[in-house]
Image (cartoon, rainbow, N blue to C red):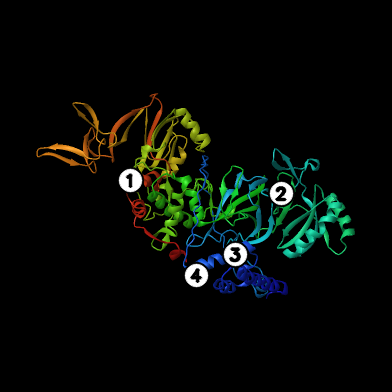
Amino acid sequence: MLNKRDKLKRILALVMVVFLALSVCTAAIYHLAVSLSANSVMGMTQAEILEKLQELEKEQNGTDNTVDDTAEEETEDIREDEETEEYEEEEEENDVDEDSADENEDEESFTPSYSEYSGSDDKLIRVALMYGTNVTVGFETVADYGFSINLVNRLGDLTHEFLWELPETKVSCVVDANLSKSAMTYSKTSDPAAAVIGGWHAEIGQDLTYEEAVELTEELEEILSELDIYAIPSYIDGGYRIRAGHFSSAADAEDIVLELCDYLPDYEITVAAPTNTAVSVVDPLTDRILFEYDDGDRTALGLAPLDTPEGERAYLMTPAKKLYDGVFMFRRYISGSIDGVSLTDIIPLGEYIKGVLPYEISSSWPLEAQKAFAICVRSFTLASVRHESAYQADLCNTTHCQVYNGRTRITDVVEQAVDETEGLVMTYGNRIVTAYYSAATGGVTVGVDDAWGGAPQPYLVAVETPWEIFTNHSHGAWQVEVSPAELCTYLRTTKGYTSLKGEIVDISIDKLAKNSTYVYQITFTDSYGTKVTVKTTDGVRTALSKYVNSSNFVVGKGSVEAEITEFVTVSAKNATVSTEGGNLSLTDSEKLRVLTADGYYDTSLDNKTVISANGKVKLDETSSVTKTQTVYASNKNNFIFVGKGWGHGVGLSQIGVRDLAKLGYEATTILEKYFTDIDIRDWHEVLD
């Protein structure tokens, strides 16, 4: 049931819409304005209401308005490998009793700054940015026009409820504790004298409404200034409260409580102590606490950027100068000796995909490559929940999941690729496929069961990829040698194969993966005759990760027979013919004149072949030649690894996608070459 205050607010909101319609719109728009419900304008600014009216007018006139965002290119690229973690998805009960439903009827949930994200890719995704051992006591964030503080329904549908607005453009989210500071970095301290921010406060009032909290904050300003402290708006255990001052001990907080009781006899005033679930928003330039949040494990604090004065979308910026879309969710994270604030970006699926593409592949690659990869990323994202139990996130931002570094590298081509494939995923049967990919596969992929064990997947089987020019990748073809003693030390001390005692005297490739050249089983033998066998292709790659880029290799002691692939491209631009007057470029003129038995005729270079050392090849196309040759180590006692590819080798090859796009293949055809018997569908058809 609506209380009188909310009814009055809705009536006033509707009156304001009608007034604005009469003031700035035609009679037709007036009728559109009246059609807006009071619910739809609750909490909207005047500028936002005007914008809504303009949108309605455009819909009435059949016009369309599109937004084209282009981000500035950034050179930094994070690529970290992390150990795979077990996870399980938590299920949240949705049933509420009648009393709780009545209590929550007046609450309005909304998703700030997401009004422009409408369509098949508006599903919200949780991407962990700072988590586990990477969390810090405080994390600084910049928004050019200030912040909106929100309650994030982190265990439900990820919607947000507005709590407070901050005009500050730079804030730090920190743990609730006594904090010292050095070079703009906060740390927990046990020395009260070193604290620049105290963890204890006086607390005034409980379960206030937003309006009551705003009013009380203003009323307290003069009183608190006389005591040389200030008001701290707070959201604690599901309601607003006002905290006053910050102190490094409970005793100091108790003293101020006694003084405040004399000033404010009508309020309940208590001491608020630090907790293990609270976080604070502070001004890092002044160390002033701007807002405190503690709702236990139920919800989390969210920071969203306020829009520009013109109503355009603004972004969040990190200390690394990376721009992010969405809402930053901050949550206290304590594990063992680690105590800090975790950071998760809550972002619409489509915007997330745009933030992945330019960090996983080059934004200069052809559009069809971008589109194919966009479908692949969308499929992997919706099929994966990798950090639920540990970090309450769907995915992390590293190569363990997918590299995501925000908006900085997004280009027009990236925007186009994601928009033109909106909602599309790969499916097998009636399920979205787990669309694995790696940098380069080296001419063949490997089945998912051979890579990690477990049951085979019909769409993730080994396929040959002759179109993949893997040597163009900086890590696509490689040779490494290692001494027997070093290899034993590495396997024993770094990889945990402690049974190995002496130097390695033999390495045996026991088995290859099905229909692939990837090594499925390998055995190491030391000088004492101890044998260690490693199985699965990714197990082999992990065991030898210091020396190999993939498990697509051969190995020998002193030398090894290896298949070496060379790629040859005869460019028409560089092709010449010998004449009496010297060498003449074939592209000096638009037409090529050829002498035949029937005389001269004019032709072009399109689809023409030439004779080269590798046989007949088409101009401007790449052909490959694979030869078996002996590769020698610099020291005959060393082991030498000769291999191809970079990564686990399952599913799609990133560089292969580029090569197929350059050959003129469309996105869907590219994906069908890597994933067997898949369909391309809108994900709503599967998940809904």
The relative height of residue 64 versus residue 320 in the rendered view (above or below) is below
Q: Earlier in the sequence, mark 2 or mark 1?
A: 2
Q: Position of residue 636 (x, y in %)?
A: 38, 24
- Spot the residue most to the right: 262
Residue nearest the viewer, comparing 192 with 454: 192
Name the image quarter holding residue 459.
Answer: bottom left
Camera-near label (2 vs 1) is 2
Q: Is residue 72 left or right of residue 272?
A: left
CA neighbours of label 4 inside 10 A, class few (<14), some (14 to 19), many (20+): few
Q: Amino acid at mark 3?
A: Leu
Q: How far apart, in angstroms, are the residues tagged by discs 3 and 4?
A: 15 Å
Tell me which residue sits at (48%, 68%) in the image. 61
Circle 4 residue: 60
Q: Earlier in the sequence, mark 3 or mark 1?
A: 3
- Spot the residue most to the left: 598
Circle 2 residue: 282
CA neighbours of label 1 inside 10 A, class few (<14), some (14 to 19), many (20+): some
Q: Position of residue 250 (x, y in %)?
A: 82, 51
Circle 3 residue: 50
Q: How far apart, in angstroms, are the residues tagged by discs 3 and 1?
A: 55 Å
Residue nearest the viewer, comparing 612 with 586: 586
Q: Is residue 233 left or right of residue 356?
A: right
Q: Amino acid at mark 4?
A: Gln
Circle 1 residue: 465
Name the image quarter holding residue 137.
Answer: top right
Q: Earlier in the sequence, mark 2 or mark 4?
A: 4
Q: Amino acid at mark 1?
A: Thr
Q: How far apart, in angstroms, are the residues tagged by discs 4 and 1?
A: 52 Å
Q: Amino acid at mark 2?
A: Val
